[in-house]
Image: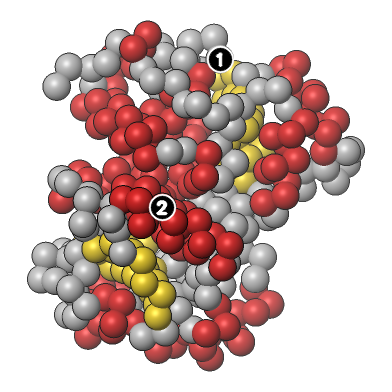
Amino acid sequence: MAAVPIHDVQRLSARHLTADMDLNGDEIQSLLKLAFQIKAYPRKYAKALSGRSICLLFEKPSLRTRITFELAIKQTGGEAVFCEGRIGAREPLKDVARNMDGWVDAIVARTFDQSTIEQLAQCASIPVINALSDLYHPCQALADMFTLKEYFGDLQGLSLAFVGDGNNVAHSLMLCSAQLGVNFSLATPPAYKPDPRIVEVAMRWAKATGASLRITEDPVEAVTDARAVYTDVWASMGQENEAAERRRYFVPYQVNDELMQKARPDAVFMHCLPAKRGEEVTDSVIESSQSIVFTQAENRLHLQKALLIMMLA
């Protein structure tokens, strides 16, 4: 498979990636195709973002998101500038966005609130990429779809089960699955179900692609015959004061050897990391031959290169 020339790369129809809804199914497929080519031929894209400067505005500490975005920018010839702190705390958010307009070519923002991402997109004329908010984590979900396609080939009809909190990662995985025809099951305690507005969108998309979408309180029901079993921490960053309360509800949702045995024999285990071993997942599962968590982490780099190129090149 020959690398696609930069001038032939499909541009995304939306200026920003504030949420998963900004991409359609065809664009996601093109993004995955380009990510495969970039992973296979990284040197051919080493100057794709030459002359471009991109600011990483992060309200939350980060390992994978920060490093993979910085490397994605630098390894494609661009310049990365990092800034950490509450956006809009020292000066109005709209002033931050206007300053960025004059300095850089895009903003990659990791925020506590989705509204911060949306305000940046409203006030900035340059592209804004959601690198995580309280509602969505689109770059994670896209990289996960890339990883699943790498392992299993065709995504249509693949079964993905998410066990745990109906959080931002669950939202993005649900939406991405619905766009690509992936059957998605979510098992979560009653008080921690996903946002019903997001479920409604995913249901509509799933109907169009022939995918199934199931939300249950039973983790065994969710993972039975699944090809991939996914989980995340029970209390995300900013929810530390809820950790003890959440643990009471989530203990039955731990992904352990017994639960993994309900999935298909060739099933893989996935986690967006960081993991709290012994809580949402046992050490035996995350260290097993079924675990592909570090491949997921690596693939953030390749997918984000493709995303930046499709938005900026």
Q: In the rendering, at what x and y percent does residue 269 appear?
A: 26, 65
Within the image, what quadrant is residue 261 found in?
bottom left
- What's the residue at 55%, 53% (across, down)? 136
Question: Neighbour class for label 2 at 10 Å: few (<14), some, many (≥20)?
Answer: many
Query: Which label lies toward us, 1 or 2?
Result: 2
Say the numbered circle drawn on residue 52: 1
Question: Neighbour class for label 1 at 10 Å: few (<14), some, many (≥20)?
Answer: some
Residue type indicated by callout 2 = Trp
Within the image, what quadrant is residue 104 found in?
top right
Question: Which residue is more in the foreground, 255 or 165?
Answer: 165
Q: Which residue position is annotated with label 2?
A: 205
Q: Residue furthest right?
A: 91
Say the numbered circle drawn on residue 106: none
Q: Is residue 303 among what the camera can see? A: no
Question: Which residue is more in the foreground, 135 or 42?
Answer: 135
Question: Which residue is more in the foreground, 168 or 255?
Answer: 168
Question: Are discs 1 and 2 less than 8 Å apart at CB?
Answer: no
Q: How far apart are marks 1 and 2 (CA)?
A: 35 Å
- What's the residue at 67%, 38% (across, down)? 57
Colour style of the rendered protein structure: secondary structure
- What's the residue at 36%, 72% (across, down)? 214
Under tag 1, what secondary structure? loop
Q: In the rendering, at what x and y percent does residue 217 appear?
A: 42, 84
- What's the residue at 23%, 17% (across, down)? 3
Q: How many labels does the image show?
A: 2
Q: In the rendering, at what x and y percent does residue 174 appear?
A: 42, 59
Q: Is residue 140 left or right of residue 261?
A: right
